[in-house]
Amino acid sequence: MWKSFVVAIAVLALERSASAASVVNKDTKIRTMIVTEGGGKTKLALHAGEAVEFCPNGCFVTWPSGDLEALTGSETIEISGGIARIK
């Protein structure tokens, strides 16, 4: 019984981490996004060429252009020319 419970928890944890949104900055400058998740705001600064995962449970993002977007947590985003595009 315990083994089944532990396996179920591990599978759920892997599914959550696998469903996070990812973003890559293809610009030569640092690009900053504001991530609003669970009522809190966080600045996410991406250096040139940097890629990160974030927003595993859905969030709102203010892109470098100032546009606001709702994310579910499964998107792949690319920043190029100061503009974020969901792939």
Image (spheres, rainbow, N blue to C red):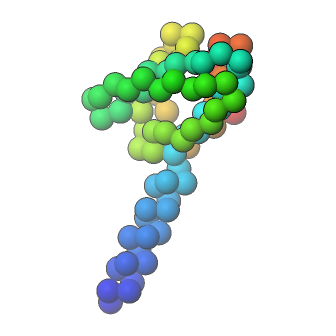
* Relative image position of residue 30 (x, y in whole percent): 60, 18
What residue is drawn where x is 50% and y is 59%? 15
What residue is drawn where x is 47% and y is 69%? 11
Q: Is residue 58 above or below residue 8?
A: above
* Relative image position of residue 67 (x, y in whole percent): 52, 13
What residue is drawn where x is 37% and y is 78%? 6
* Relative image position of residue 5 (x, y in whole percent): 35, 79
Q: Is residue 78 above or below residue 30?
A: below
* Relative image position of residue 81 (x, y in whole percent): 71, 13
Question: Is residue 75 in sight in this rendering?
Answer: no
Residue furthest to the left = 39
Residue 47 horizontal side relative to residue 81, left or right:
left
Q: Quadrant of residue 28?
A: top right
For the C terminus, the quadrant is top right
Q: Nearer the viewer, residue 73 or 32?
A: 32
Residue furthest to the bottom = 1
